[in-house]
């Protein structure tokens, strides 16, 4: 006899398979294929484990891994919002909260509550773990765009100041990673793959 909790957990596992079909604007390293949300989340989880020693503060790495693995699950319902979108704000929206409640609501109550709390903590960006998770979330597409000769920066006519402003929040999670990223942004201008007004 299957337990009710197991059946709920299996439903959730089946539902999140849809994340593999959510296409992001960024492309894989040195590639013209768009990344999907599941690939993005996996990559951030690995980055969090490997780069955790660069966090400004001591962090619970498992919590960061949870954050980056679940942070985009809401996009199953809400869709991907491009970081440089000028028509839709890239912040926690009512639409995303509804998605979080529906999707995590498939789980048993205790797991539902934990997942929503972790997702909300990431969105708020106030704890050391959330700041570091957001640093990972901003670093990966930066690395992708520099590997793709400007990638989405060129494709969507994104200039230096927009990139700098969106990426500078990385410093709150890791000063050393932000220093690396800042140099990469400046080098991108020098190489002509990121325009400076």
Image (tube, rainbow, N blue to C red):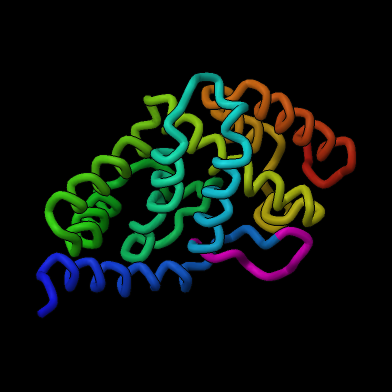
Residue found 67% across the figure and 23% down from its top: 176
Q: Position of residue 197 (x, y in %)?
A: 75, 34
Whether residue 196 is situated above or below residue 67 in the rendered picture: above
Question: Can the viewer see residue 36 in this picture?
Answer: yes
Question: Does 34 appear above or below 92?
Answer: below
- The quadrant holding residue 26 is bottom right
**Is residue 89 visible to us here?**
no
The image position of residue 177, as x and y in percent, is 66, 29
Which residue extends farthest right?
A: 191
Residue 132 in percent (x, y) is at 50, 32
The residue stretch that appears in magenta: 29-37
Q: Compared to 105, does 68 lie above or below? A: above
Q: Is residue 2 left or right of residue 117?
A: left
Residue 51 image position (x, y, % from top left): 62, 36
Of the 4 image quadrants, the one containing the N terminus is bottom left
Does residue 125 appear left or right of residue 149 in this picture? left
Residue at image x 19%, y 61%? 107
Residue nearest the observer in this picture, 196 or 187: 187
Q: Place residue 119 in its image quadrant.
A: top left
Residue 8 included in the magenta stretch of the image:
no
Give me the residue at 47% from left, 73% from top.
Answer: 21
Rendered image quadrant of residue 99: bottom left
Number of numbered discs present? 0
- Give the side of residue 132 with respect to residue 154, left or right: left
Q: Is residue 86 above or below residue 176?
A: below
- For the view shown, which residue lies furthest in the bottom direction? 1
Q: Residue at x 60, y 64 (%)?
A: 35
Residue at the extreme front: 1
Viewer-nearest residue: 91 or 12: 12
Nearest the viewer among 5 and 44 is: 5
């Amino acid at each position: 006899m299957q337990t009710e909790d197991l059946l709920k957990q299996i439903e959730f596992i089946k539902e999140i398979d849809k994340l593999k079909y959510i296409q992001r604007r960024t492309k894989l390293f040195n590639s013209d294929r768009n990344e999907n949300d599941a690939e993005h989340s996996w990559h951030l989880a690995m980055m969090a484990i490997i780069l955790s020693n660069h966090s400004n503060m001591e962090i619970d790495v498992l919590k960061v891994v949870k954050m980056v693995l679940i942070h985009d699950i809401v996009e199953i319902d809400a869709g991907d919002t491009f970081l440089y979108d000028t028509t839709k704000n890239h912040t926690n929206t009512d639409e995303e909260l509804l998605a979080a409640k529906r999707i995590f609501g498939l789980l048993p109550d205790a797991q539902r509550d934990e997942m929503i709390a972790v997702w909300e903590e990431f969105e708020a960006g106030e704890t050391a773990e959330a700041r570091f998770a957001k640093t990972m979330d901003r670093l990966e597409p930066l690395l992708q765009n520099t590997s793709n000769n400007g990638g989405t920066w060129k494709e969507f006519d994104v200039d230096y100041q927009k990139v700098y402003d969106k990426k500078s929040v990385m410093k709150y999670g890791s000063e050393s990673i932000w220093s690396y990223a800042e140099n990469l942004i400046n080098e991108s201008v020098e190489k002509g793959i990121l325009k400076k007004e």
